[in-house]
Image (cartoon, rainbow, N blue to C red):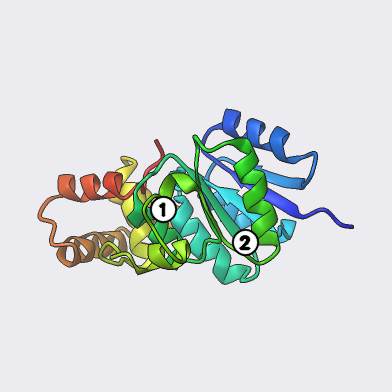
Amino acid sequence: MTRPRIILADAHRLMLDALKNLLEPEFEVVGTFIDGQALVECAPELQPHVIVLDVGMPLMNGLIAGERLKQAMPLVKLIYVTMNHDPEMAGEAFRLGASAYLLKNSAGSELLRAIREVVRGGFYVTPLMTKGMVGSFVLNFKRMKSKPSLTIRQKEVLQLLAEGRSMKEAAFKLKVSPRTVAYHKYTMMEHLQIRSSAELIEFAMKSSLVAA
């Protein structure tokens, strides 16, 4: 029987090495990535069944990357392993197509169990996130009130600005004009009712758009 093909994505190489060592006896790890942009560009060629990724990654965070990956590979299963305990973040992950959500202080055996479950077509949420919930945990998370929605392009612009890049640098990275970046920036500020660049960056940090 063919082993499920797994891709790992995390900003920290030590984490990637640890996950690879944990998974390889049972699964085939076909690629590892330290930023979301490289993940999105290379993952389709590797034909993974499951992608294990963090929320906070440089260049493109895990939520944006996950949304793009599901567009390119609708059948791929996304498993988030993150430090973010925010139920709203978990809800956003599931709304964007995640199949599982774990915390980095979850046991290694939990990740193995989550992969087995999503490969079978199921969902998994770490018990560390579900205390007090009844019924379908995933449905509970999906129903949570989401933060004001931004387009994928707006999220990309916001992340690059939050990482300290100028509008010109962000434009070069996204292959658009600085005027386009400025348009997205000020459209976001109006949409989020934010009055300054500092508040916009603070929103990005709270939303885990920047790698820790």
Using the numbered discs, state the Cα–Cα distance from disc 2 to disc 1 in whole angstroms: 31 Å
Q: Please say if 130 is above or below 186.
A: above
Residue 175 position within the rendered picture, expressed as x and y whole percent measured from the top left: 44, 59
Inspect this view and state whether residue 175 appears: no
Residue 58 position within the rendered picture, expressed as x and y whole percent measured from the top left: 45, 43
Residue flagged by tag 1: what amino acid is it? Phe
Residue 64 position within the rendered picture, expressed as x and y whole percent measured from the top left: 45, 58
Number of residue marks: 2
User: What label does residue 203 carry, if any?
Assistant: none
Residue found at the far top of this picture: 14
Inspect this view and state whether residue 126 appears: yes
Mark 2: which secondary structure?
strand
Q: Which residue is mark 1?
A: 172
Badge 1 crowding class, 10 Å Cα cut-off, few under 14, some 14 to 19, many 20 or more, is few
Badge 2 crowding class, 10 Å Cα cut-off, few under 14, some 14 to 19, many 20 or more, is many
Residue flagged by tag 2: what amino acid is it? Lys
Residue 138 position within the rendered picture, expressed as x and y whole percent measured from the top left: 46, 63
Q: Nearer the viewer, residue 187 or 64?
A: 64
Q: Choose top left, top right, bottom left or bottom right for residue 74.
A: bottom right
